[in-house]
Amino acid sequence: MDNNQHSSGVEKGASTAVRRRLAAILVADIAGYSRLMGADEEATLLEMQKFRFSLVDPTIGQHHGRIIKTMGDGLLVEFTSVYDAIECSLAVQRGMIDRMRGLPENRQFRYRMGINLGDVLSEGDDVYGDGVNIAARLQEIAEPNGIAISSVVLGHLEDELQHAFADMGAHELKNIDRPVRVYHYSVDAHAKPENTAIRPFIDPPDNKPLLITGGCLCGNVRYQATAKPLGSMLCHCRMCQRFSGAPILGGTTFLTEALSFSKGEPKFFVSSKIAQRGFCGNCGTAVIYQGTLGVWTKWTMIFTASLDEPEKYPPTYHLGIESTMPWLDIHDDLPRTMCKDSPSLVDAYRTVNQQVP
């Protein structure tokens, strides 16, 4: 991934102003992604979306990162702090290792990450320049489940964390006019025992067809899903509070094509320019949240408490914490993200030229 790949296509010097700033850039991709896609394209896309929803995007938001763009399996993320970039990369890699345990070797997803601190040029929502290119080249030489950083990044880390990065020496990186000293962190070598509390979903027994069901309080609206959810979360935003009448609303996201209504259908309220919310017209139960624009229509969120077995789908992060009730005391260690820091919400509202409310 080089300068051309990270360009938005806007001509430099056009009406959009070009600005220079210092930024920490993280570039990531999945090792062996082409092989995974070749073996089972549909399953690979579903798994990648699940990890994005349940782990990657929430963790980036929690650490104040901004997803500049996605490129298939790749991510380009900007941080204003090196510390946030490192902590985010470690959290994602450790979370992925937890989720990969028990899966066949040929179906495991392993991120390779590169992080650099340097000057970048920004034009609209895009960034480019050597600061970006070095991060992309570092990602290319990182090991699966590894993080490669430049010496300037290492210099901003605390001593204990510095010692965890192995010195790989100076490297000649493609299209970079000077050697770059590289340091590498192997997450495998520092992996902790499995944390079963954060495993997001309970798989059905072997050979048993997957069917996830739920519905409203009065039974007039019933739905079913024939694929695993992509992720679950707890939302504290004011829209969800008002819609549900509760301080927190749990949501579990599915591919829209995997969901169907087996009895009745909800009524819908268009709550914003990007989404609508469904409820039972008889008993008023909050049932569903759907995106209404482009790619966002591919995913549908079922409100978790309406599932017949909601205990099987624990949340993996908190969203909208800027609206958390002051009298609500939460003691879990799940990632916590403000709506304005949610990459998926920012991207959705950007399509309608709005900021996240």
Image: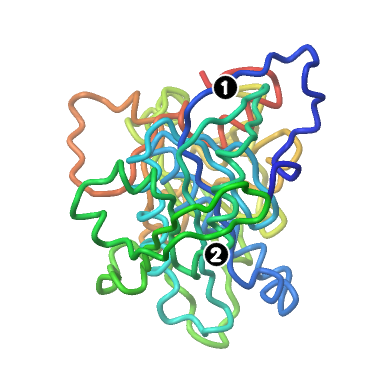
- Give me the residue at 33% from left, 45% from top: 335
State the CA–CA distance, disc 1 to disc 2.
27 Å
In the picture, residue 44 is in which quadrant? bottom right
Mark 2 falls on what kind of element? Answer: helix
Q: Is residue 63 visible?
A: yes
Q: Position of residue 229 (x, y in %)?
A: 54, 59
Q: Position of residue 283 (x, y in %)?
A: 50, 36
Specify whether 194 is left or right of 256: left
Specify whether 65 is left or right of 91: right
Residue 85 versus residue 45 in the image, above or below: above
Give the amino acid type for the residue marked by disc 2 in the picture.
Ile
Q: Residues within 10 Å of mark 2 (few under 14, many from 20)?
A: some
Q: Earlier in the sequence, mark 1 or mark 2?
A: 1
In the picture, residue 276 is in which quadrant? top right
Instruction: Decide which of 303, 163 is in the foreground and name it.
Output: 163
- Give me the residue at 37% from left, 57% from top: 314
Q: Position of residue 301 (x, y in %)?
A: 56, 46
Give the residue at the far front of this rendering: 178
Q: Is residue 283 visible?
A: no
Instruction: Decide which of 86, 230 is in the foreground and name it.
Output: 86
Residue 209 versus residue 279 in the image, above or below: below
User: Where is mark 2, residue-wise?
Assistant: 141
User: Where is mark 1, residue-wise?
Assistant: 20
- Give me the residue at 49% from left, 38% from top: 285
